[in-house]
Amino acid sequence: MHCPKCDFELPNGSEDCPACGVIFAKYLYPGSVGATYGGVGGSSPAMPPRTRTPPTVDGSQIVSEIFRLYFSHILQFLLITAVIMLPALAIDHALTSGRVTSPRELMIGLGIVLVFSQLAAASLTFGVLQAMRKRPLSLVGCLMAGVLRVVPVLAVTIVQVVAVGAGLVLLVIPGIILITVVSVAIPAAVDEQPGIMGALSRSAELTKGHRLKVLGVLMVTGVVGVILNLAVAKTIVAVPGITFALASASTIIITALSATTTGVLYYRLRSAYESVAVENLVSAFD
């Protein structure tokens, strides 16, 4: 038999998949019915017909978990983000302060900022998923995982920005809808390695039926991010270099909170549909 989700070959009669963590009795197929329990070429009897009705997801519990995880690991999350993003923050400051005027240097600088910011996003997403597994976090471990995933995460981010930007330019509502549709594509890229379009499709699949709740979660964490930034602005003493310090602190806080938000959303949505245990997250790195 084969896993109905990832097609991993299994002994007949298996109840779950060690490769992707799916528990077959609770797995909701992307289609309506008719899939074979044994998967492609499987020899097991057919699974009972099951319509993909979106399971219940509690948005308030997800918000609570996001902030509990974020604040309980805040020093680690901020440190990992700050160290990895340091080159991007320094170059971004040089670009915005007018020190770089050559078009060639400007393009190189923007490229470096983009790569390091997505390296931080990939590394911290791995760190968030590890924290959910109650595994120890290390800068080196997160960085190594980020390096392995930075290319698909970078590509996914570019597609996200282009698609959402086009939606917002044409009409505001389509842009907002797209934000929710692709909201968990980066965690999917880090955890499941499905490729660029696969990560985007996976996000669309997981968020289907829950996009208003996803939007609500994103809005709540976004407001809290703004409040945290204002608090940082109030506490930093006016000294030379405050602009760089404030901009850097704001970027680090938002990046860490954003990765925590999408990481928790991804797992809770995946768990609701597939009953995947948290221990199965990013298990490919074990």
Image (cartoon, helix red, strand yellow):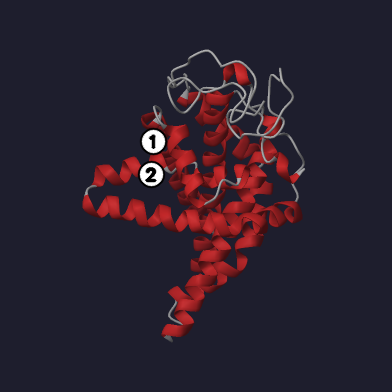
Direction from residue 152 to residue 74 in the image, left or right:
right
Residue 239 in sight from this viewpoint: no
Q: In the rendered image of this protein, does residue 215 appear above or below residue 113?
A: above
In the rendered structure, the answer to whether residue 102 lies left or right of residue 125 reads: left
At label 1, the amino acid type is Leu
- Residue 238 position in % (x across, y down): 51, 65
Quarter of the picture containing the N terminus is: top right
Q: Secondary structure at mark 2?
A: helix
* Residue 246 shown left or right of residue 164 in the figure: right
For the residues labelled 2 and 1, say whether their Cβ atoms are less than 8 Å apart. yes
Q: Residue 127 appears in which quarter of the rendering?
A: top right
Which residue: 46% across, 45% down? 200
Return the x and y of residue 43 as percentages of the image width and height: 65, 22
- Vertical placement of 2 versus 101: above or below? above
Residue 251 or residue 201, whichever sits in front: 201
Whichever of labels 2 and 1 marks the residue nearer the N terminus, that label is 2
Q: Residues within 10 Å of mark 1 (few under 14, many from 20)?
A: some
Whether residue 126 sits left or right of residue 222 in the image: it is right
Front: mark 2 or 1: 2
Instruction: Identify residue type, mark 2.
Output: Ile
Tally the numbered discs. Answer: 2
**Residue pointed to by mark 2:** 179
Q: Quadrant of residue 146?
A: bottom right
Q: Does dot 1 land on a helix, a strand or a loop?
A: helix
- Regarding residue 41, the answer to whether it shows in the image is yes
Q: Residue at x 53, y 52 (%)?
A: 255
Q: Quick check: 81 above or below 130?
A: below
Q: Which residue is mark 1?
A: 215
Q: Residue at x 51, y 61 (%)?
A: 246
Task: Count neighbours of disc 2 (C-alpha within 10 A) and say few if under 14, some if 14 to 19, many if 20 or more.
Answer: many
Residue 135 against residue 76 in the figure, above or below: above
Question: Looking at this view, is 68 or 211 the one in front?
Answer: 211
